[in-house]
Every structure is written in C-alpha cells, then in structure tokens.
Amino acid sequence: METTTSHTGHLSKRAPARSWLAIAALGWLAMTMGLFVATVSGNAVRASGATDNAIAVVQALVAALLIVPAVRLIQRRFHLTAKLLPLTPVAFLHLLGGAALATLMGGLGFLITGALGWTTIEAWHVSADLLPAIALNTCIAFLYEALPEELSMRGVVYSGLRLRLPAYAAYAGQVLLFVLVPITVNLLQALVGLDRGNIINPEYVIMLLCFGTTLQLWRSLTGTLWASIGFHLAFLEIARFVILQRDQRLLTYSELDAGTAEIVIQFGIIVVGSAVVLAVLNLWRRHRLRAVSRE
C-alpha cells in the first residue's frame, strides 16, 4: 500500500493509493450537487416571494447540510484521518491570519492605486446598519461558500489527488476541478429550466484558477483549512462591501478607468499578490525543514 505523509497531513496511512480517483471524484460531486440543489432550493423560495436574505439563508443551509456531511462520509469511507478543521487556538490564529492577509492586500491595493491616481476614496460609510449586514453576509458566505468549498475542493479532492499525484499535479487537478463546479452547475440549471447563476467567461475562469491556487497554498502552508476559510471570507466581504459599490458599502471610490479596482486590487493584488506571498512562504518553510533535517 502506497502512503505519503507531509505537513499538510492530507493522507491517512490506511488510505489505499488506488482510491485516489474515487476520493477526488466524490469530493467534487458532493460540492457540485450540493451547490446545484442549493440553487434549486433558492429558486423555489424566491418563487414564494421570499426576501433576498431569506433566499440566501436557505441556500446556505442547504449547501452546508448536504456538502459537509457528504465530505465527512467520504473521509470515513476512505479512512482520511487528516484534521482539516481542528478546533484549537492555533486554528483560530490561522483563520485570523487568512482574513488579515486578504484585508491587508486590499488596503495595500487602494494605497498603490491611490498613489498612482487610478482610484480615489471619496467617502466612508461606517454606520450601525453596515456592521450587522457584513456579519450576516459573512455567516451566509461561511455556510454557502467557504466551509463546503474548502472542505470538498481544498480538502478531500486535493487529498485524493495527492494519493497518486505529485503536489504540482494535484494543485493543477484541484484547480481545474474547481473551475468545473460552476460550469457543471450552470449546465444542470439550464437542463431543469433555471436561469444560469454565473456568467462563465475567460475572465471568470482565470479568477477561479488563481483564487483556487491561492486557497490551496494556504492549506499547504498551515496544514489545515482555517486560513483558507479566513482568506475566502475576507475576499468575499471586500468584494461585496467595497469593490462592487453596492447600496450598502464601506466606502465610495472613483476610478480613473472603469474596472480598475476589480482588476488591479481585487484580482491583481488580493488574489495574485497573496499567491506570490504564500508561494514564497511555502518555499521558505520547505527550505527551513530541509535545513533542519540535515542537522
């Protein structure tokens, strides 16, 4: 029986290498079908006249209640004993660290684009109504997006791929399967007569490829999924309450060219910039471990 062990703790010593494809496929299927059923449920609730918040809550609960137990079943069936979400003080620090990096990179993005004259912050809108809105959206995003996605894609899918593939190939495989999730959900929605939830274009695919890589780098660095979840949540809240300039937002900004904040700050600095930082940290950690092992 082939086994592999590393800081990421992605394998159990009892998991046979021949199970790699089943683990990866089932993890991907759990995420895809859970998300699809959640969107169908949301559309059913919408048809009854529910509010946007009620729809979002229903979708979040359905996704979490389907995907998280499915992932746990996969872990038990294939004896994947890695502790992806340990409840420890260090795990809490990882969660905060992931969120902090996304937030710091977002702030750095506005500083850089502001210094270059590409963006200008016009006003701040901190209010008693804004903080509860961010808190509610964060809870929904945790249940609907961050928790199920990290457990399935960066969790069991990557673990399954690493049973057979080297790290770089497992990274590529996980990211490609990640991109296939919304594409497949869109196709399923079209088959049952629902409006497609996402517009799949080259820009969206590139964003997913880079975002999935950044989140996987967090797992490689910390060995758990908490930092990935923290980064994921902070990224979503920055996008929704800062970049997209919705009615409820933290600040109002102007751009020299339309789309500067979305392309340069959200994608270029938060996602790609963070990936570079994490890649350097992973390389430094690997070099340090090798140096220690030689002593």
Image (spheres, helix red, strand yellow):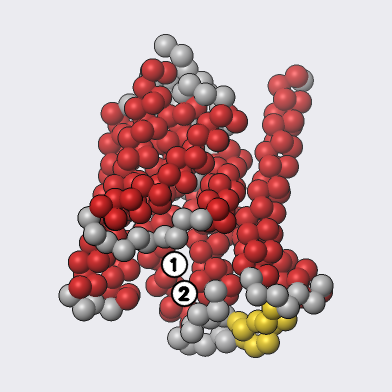
Q: Residue at x 56, y 47 (%)?
A: 209
Mark 1–mark 2 CB contact (< 8 Å): yes
Q: Position of residue 58 (x, y in %)?
A: 26, 65
Can you see residue 282? yes
Disc ID at residue 51: none
Label 1's element? helix
| 134, 256: nearer the viewer | 256
Determine the CA span between mark 1 and mark 2: 6 Å
Q: Residue at x 40, y 49 (%)?
A: 183
The picture quadrant where one finds residue 57 is bottom left
> Which residue corresponds to mark 1?
138
Label 2's element? helix
Give the position of the N terminus as an image quadrant: top left
Amino acid at pointer 1: Thr
Q: Residues within 10 Å of mark 2 (few under 14, many from 20)?
A: some
Up-down: is 176 above or below 87? above
> Which residue corresponds to mark 2?
134
Residue farthest toward the left in the current orientation of the protein: 48
Q: Residue at x 46, y 23 (%)?
A: 163
Q: Position of residue 96 (x, y in %)?
A: 56, 58
Up-down: is 269 above or below 255? above
Q: Residues within 10 Å of mark 1 (few under 14, many from 20)?
A: some
User: Would you say 195 lies left or right of 213 here?
Assistant: left
Give the position of the C terminus as an image quadrant: top right
Up-down: is 16 above or below 103? above
Q: Residue at x 20, y 66 (%)?
A: 44
Residue farthest toward the top in the current orientation of the protein: 1
The picture quadrant where one finds residue 86 is top left
